[in-house]
């Protein structure tokens, strides 16, 4: 059962956030309103939400998911692969220390963005991407093993992060898109493939019985609802301009 989430208010510098898209910079005021609605949706799902102040030093700092992996046994501070994001961990560390006794870290030369980590039925899948290298993934596997948890590596082709294209729901159901449809590592799950033009909806979150998904993907929404999941949609268009999805905006534990 997930009970808490950590979020960080978007900063003014978000207009300079990293992106691979050509949608232009986000509108700061709209991003703030969307972030407020996102927090409300997490609260509607029963979570206590810990709201951190904006951090102007890091344009991407609202994407808190990437800087830590919070497991039932321990927290792991990552070492984000984009140079402009590596130090985001420094400001997150004291926050995590308030909630976790056991804290581990990923060391250089390891790089790890937690957007590359998918928990599905007690097993952690780690995507090797431009942000996560083999050293980072292997350090994480060893840390998790010490706490009795298992993990394995998945090679990615074109997505930014593993969870850009795949999302675990519940009862073995997994949303897949693009390169993840019928990928051998995930064929044991009940795949829910999404249409190519709505692939971004694979970054949805199952939280305490509800699926939080981005607004604007009606086919994906209908597919998920047809599987029996109550869905709540959130407009995150300003974050999508900078490669952000539903999961990236919070750390859940
Ligand atoms: C970045 O490139 O790092 C941000 N603009 C987007 C991060 C998205 N995070 C995630 O998928 N977990």
Image (spheres, rainbow, N blue to C red):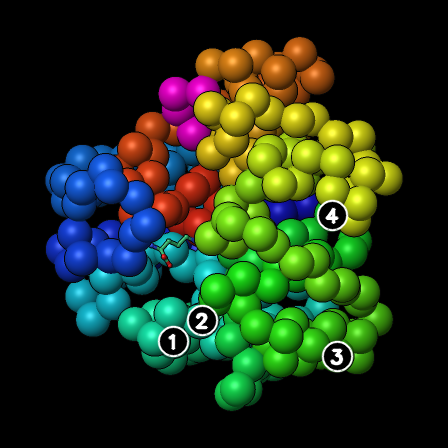
Q: Which mark is residue 120?
A: 4
User: Residue at image x 38%, y 76%?
Assistant: 86
Say if disc 3 is inside 8 Å of ligand 1. Answer: no
The quadrant of the rendering that contains the C terminus is bottom right
Name the dominant secondary structure of the magenta segment: loop
Q: Which residue is mark 1?
A: 86
At which x and y percent is residue 83?
A: 34, 75
Q: Which residue is mark 2?
A: 80
Q: Are marks 2 and 1 in contact (CB under 8 Å)?
A: yes
Q: Residues within 10 Å of mark 4 (few under 14, many from 20)?
A: some
**Earlier along the polypeptide chain: callout 2 or callout 1?**
2
Label 2 to label 3, Cα distance in Å?
18 Å
Q: Are marks 1 and 3 in contact (CB under 8 Å)?
A: no
Say if disc 4 is inside 8 Å of ligand 1. Answer: no
**Earlier along the polypeptide chain: callout 4 or callout 1?**
1
User: Residue at image x 30%, y 44%?
Assistant: 21
The quadrant of the rendering that contains the N terminus is top right
Residue 91's place in the image compared with 48, above or below, is below
Residue 95: name its quadrant: bottom left
Q: Which residues are magenta?
A: 213-217
Q: Secondary structure at mark 4?
A: strand
The residue lying toward the viewer, choosing from 7 and 83, is 83
Q: Are marks 4 and 1 in contact (CB under 8 Å)?
A: no
Q: Which residue is mark 3?
A: 142
**Earlier along the polypeptide chain: callout 3 or callout 4?**
4
Q: Are marks 3 and 4 in contact (CB under 8 Å)?
A: no
Q: Are marks 4 and 2 in contact (CB under 8 Å)?
A: no
98 left or right, relative to 226: left
Residue 173: name its quadrant: top right
């Amino acid at each position: 059962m997930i009970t808490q989430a950590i979020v960080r208010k978007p900063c003014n510098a978000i207009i300079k956030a990293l992106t691979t898209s050509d949608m232009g910079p986000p509108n700061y005021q709209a991003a703030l309103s969307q972030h407020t609605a996102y927090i409300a949706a997490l609260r509607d799902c029963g979570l206590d939400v810990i709201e951190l102040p904006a951090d102007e030093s890091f344009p991407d700092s609202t994407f808190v998911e990437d800087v830590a992996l919070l497991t039932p046994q321990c927290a792991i501070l990552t070492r984000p692969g984009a140079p402009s994001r590596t130090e985001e961990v420094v400001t997150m560390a004291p926050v995590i220390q308030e909630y976790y006794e056991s804290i581990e870290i990923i060391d250089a030369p390891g790089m790890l963005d937690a957007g590359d980590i998918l928990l599905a039925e007690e097993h952690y899948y780690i995507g090797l991407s431009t942000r996560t290298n083999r050293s980072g993934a292997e350090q994480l596997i060893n840390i998790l093993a010490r706490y009795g948890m298992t993990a394995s590596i998945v090679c990615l082709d074109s997505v930014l992060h593993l969870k850009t294209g795949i999302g675990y729901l519940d009862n073995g159901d997994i949303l897949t898109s693009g390169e993840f449809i019928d990928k051998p590592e995930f064929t044991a799950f009940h795949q829910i493939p999404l249409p190519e033009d709505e692939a971004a909806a694979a970054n949805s979150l199952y939280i305490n019985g509800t699926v939080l998904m981005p607004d604007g993907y009606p086919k994906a929404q209908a597919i998920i609802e047809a599987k029996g999941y109550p869905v709540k949609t959130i407009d995150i268009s300003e974050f999508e301009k900078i490669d952000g999805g539903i999961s990236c905006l919070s750390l859940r534990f």
